[in-house]
Amino acid sequence: MTNPATTPEYAPVRIPVALALRTHALLQTFEGTEGLVYWAGVSEGRGGTITTLVVPQTEAYYARIQTSPAANAEVIDTLSRHRIVLLGQAHSHPPGAPARHSEGDDVLTFSPFEGAISIVVPNFAQGDCDPRTWGVHRYTHGAYRFIPPSRRLEHLHVLPTEVDHRR
């Protein structure tokens, strides 16, 4: 059976490299526990562009992180005030854990929604930021589905912050 998340019905979620680097740095601030950063921005059909990072109040542990309904309500209020939408999330996993969704990843943070992107950053985001090591998942047809590395660019595109063509 074909993985529905690898079909063309989804457009990429784009994130400027500066926000990818900042996501990585924010995940490091959780120090020894899983971290969580919501990705918000402008929806564009079945994809979108990240403009804003939102760090919710969490209950963070070595191998689990969760948010409460009250914490998520605070996030919704922030999104509403800025007229942006939630496009997905990035969270870290402990050293040695795969960059794949666990059961808890599917239910302990924000309620999943069709097309949501979820990034798993290995090793508590220690070391340099390298999006090629991130596990990319897309919520489709009722479940988060892992995106194989060969299809990653169809779902996550890191944009340059600036391009200078001067000679």
Image (tube, rainbow, N blue to C red):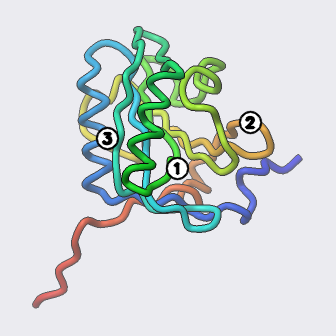
Give the CA distance from mark 2 to mark 1.
Answer: 16 Å
* Residue 10 visible in the displayed image: yes
Secondary element type, mark 1: strand
What amino acid is labelled 2 in the image? Answer: Ala
97 to the left or right of 31: right
The x and y percentages for residue 57 are 37, 22
Pair 1/3: label in front: 1
- Numbered tag placed on residue 143 in the rendering: 2
Give the CA distance from mark 2 to mark 3.
Answer: 24 Å
For disc 3, the neighbor class at 10 Å (few under 14, some 14 to 19, many from 20) is many
CB contact under 8 Å: marks 2 and 1: no
The x and y percentages for residue 46 are 64, 62
Q: Which residue is mark 3?
A: 23
Secondary element type, mark 3: helix
Q: Which residue is mark 1?
A: 87
The x and y percentages for residue 24 are 30, 38
25 to the left or right of 104: left
Specify which label sits upstream in the sequence, 1 or 3: 3
Q: Quadrant of the C terminus?
A: bottom left
